Image (cartoon, rainbow, N blue to C red):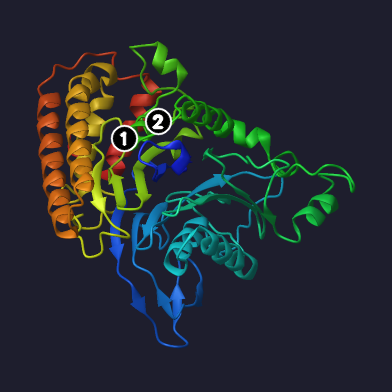
């Protein structure tokens, strides 16, 4: 399950828009950071998405993506014009389509490749939805189909929430701050909708003709959303966003690391149990927790003179470091970090994602003690990264300088994670601190499937 949020320029310290997302998927479903340059395509060319082939656009914009390794689409991303999009699984009273079509992650990437701003992306996604529909298996292992919602935002400060049911949809323009999770959130107030949305609701008996139409009340499968803790996480992120008058990248990073109200009260809290509810998600043995591992995190700050994407490229932001990538207006030509080779679903220490898994999974063996062994250093190091980037932006540093700084920081972060892993490895093991038997069995099975070293 996932959480996505935005703070528009009037709600940020810098006056830029800030976007953030945690992508939650299966624990061995590695994500890959990838850059796809702008391209022109021959007339009549076609494009193979995850499952279906569609006509290719004449030109596609350059994009930066965080993509589950096995699919064409992406969980979150940005394009060269400062457009950012994140998506969520949502659950309706109408079952999602099982037959292969475009999946939500395909629609997200197509929006980034074919639109310049949030208004265009809304049109691109809804047009594709009407033409091709959405459907097909979205799980790495097993079967999981769902409808999708999207948070679409751009460097001009515009943002929309788009929520869909099959080929029907509603869109709400964001006022100040907004979050979405695995639940429908648009009520009676929306700015645009598909022509068939209300007639379908009436036909299905979700609302009577002439009654006030509340999109979420009409369509949401509240029991399924509650089981996925979508409503509780949406309430949590909405509350955390509302606690500050003005946000900065660091405050959105803090929300992505939030473990929930219970963890905030209990210093010995550990990520175990059948149900989740934390924004920073750790997989466990419950049926929903299988899809509840944060496998990538992204914070973007976009506005005049600012096109900075703070990426982990790794799972679990509590054990990860956000690192800057300069990509978008004003930083054309900035060198990107070396993201390394693409990962798969088995351990490969040459990849960024799996190399971090050594640290992440070692921490889970004694969560509070092991996380505290480096969390303070993580925060200080990240604060220094933020300060160095802010200094470059304040003096109007060039794209060349920005690319060089980004690569330096990524190298420092990699060295820090290696250092923390060695520190954790030397800590004594304490029986009983690794969670319940079912929790340990679950992670043991995941380690065997991934062929993790002992």
Q: How many marks?
A: 2
Q: Nearer the viewer, mark 2 or mark 1?
A: 2
Residue found farthest to the front: 395
Q: CA distance from mark 2 to mark 1?
A: 10 Å
Q: Secondary structure at mark 1?
A: loop
Q: Quadrant of the C terminus?
A: top left
Residue that label 1 marks = 317
Image height of 125 relative to 184, above or below: below
Helix, strand or loop at mark 2: helix
Residue lying at 39% horizontally and 27% vertically, measured from the top left? 258
Residue at image x 66%, y 60%?
167
Residue 285 seen anywhere in this rendered image of the structure = yes
User: In this picture, is 14 found above or below 153?
Assistant: above
Q: Quadrant of residue 280?
A: top left
> Which numbered dot is residue 255?
2
Q: Quadrant of residue 296?
A: top left
Seen from the viewer's position, the closer of residues 212 and 396 is 396
Query: Is 237 on the left or on the right of 373, as rendered?
Result: right
Q: In the figure, is residue 12 to the left or right of 103?
A: left
- Residue situated in front as seen by the camera: 330 or 41: 330
Asked whether the beta carbons under mark 2 and mark 1 sit within 8 Å of each other, the answer is no
């Amino acid at each position: 399950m996932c959480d996505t949020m935005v703070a528009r320029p009037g709600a940020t310290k810098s006056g830029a828009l800030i976007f953030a997302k945690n992508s939650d998927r299966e624990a061995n479903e590695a994500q890959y950071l990838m850059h796809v340059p702008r391209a022109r395509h021959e007339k009549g060319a076609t494009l193979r998405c995850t499952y279906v082939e569609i006509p290719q656009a004449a030109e596609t914009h350059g994009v930066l993506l965080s993509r589950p390794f096995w699919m064409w689409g992406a969980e979150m991303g940005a394009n060269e014009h400062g457009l950012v999009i994140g998506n969520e699984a949502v659950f309706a009273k109408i079952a999602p389509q099982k037959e292969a079509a475009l999946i939500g992650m395909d629609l997200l990437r197509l929006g980034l490749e074919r639109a310049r701003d949030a208004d265009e992306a809304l049109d691109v996604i809804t047009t594709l939805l009407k033409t091709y529909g959405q459907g097909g298996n979205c799980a790495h292992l097993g079967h999981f189909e769902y409808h999708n919602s999207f948070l679409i935002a751009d460097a001009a400060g515009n943002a929309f929430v788009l929520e869909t049911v099959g080929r029907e949809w509603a869109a709400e323009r964001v006022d100040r701050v907004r979050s979405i999770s695995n639940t429908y959130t648009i009520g009676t107030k929306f700015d645009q909708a598909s022509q068939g949305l209300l007639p379908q609701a009436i036909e299905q008996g979700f609302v009577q003709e002439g009654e006030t139409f509340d999109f979420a009340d009409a369509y949401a499968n509240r029991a399924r959303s509650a089981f996925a803790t979508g409503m509780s996480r949406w309430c949590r992120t909405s509350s955390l966003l509302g606690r500050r008058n003005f946000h900065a990248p660091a405050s959105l990073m803090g929300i992505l690391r939030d473990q929930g109200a219970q963890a905030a009260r209990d210093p010995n809290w550990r990520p175990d149990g059948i149900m989740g509810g934390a924004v920073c998600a750790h997989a466990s043995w419950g049926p929903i927790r299988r899809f509840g591992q944060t496998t990538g995190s992204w914070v973007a700050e976009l506005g005049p003179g600012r096109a900075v994407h703070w990426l982990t490229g790794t799972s679990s932001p509590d054990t990860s470091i956000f690192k800057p990538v300069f990509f978008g207006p004003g930083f054309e030509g900035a060198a990107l970090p070396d993201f390394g080779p693409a990962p798969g679903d088995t351990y490969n220490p040459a990849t960024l994602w799996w190399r971090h898994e050594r640290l992440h999974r070692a921490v889970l063996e004694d969560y509070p003690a092991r996380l505290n062994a480096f969390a303070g250093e993580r925060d200080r190091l990240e604060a220094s990264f933020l300060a160095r980037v802010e200094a470059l932006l304040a003096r109007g540093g060039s794209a060349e300088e920005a690319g060089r700084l980004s690569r330096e920081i990524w190298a420092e972060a990699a060295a820090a994670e290696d250092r923390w892993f060695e520190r954790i490895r030397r800590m004594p093991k304490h029986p009983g601190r690794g969670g319940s038997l079912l929790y340990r069995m679950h992670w043991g099975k995941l380690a065997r499937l991934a062929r993790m070293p002992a």
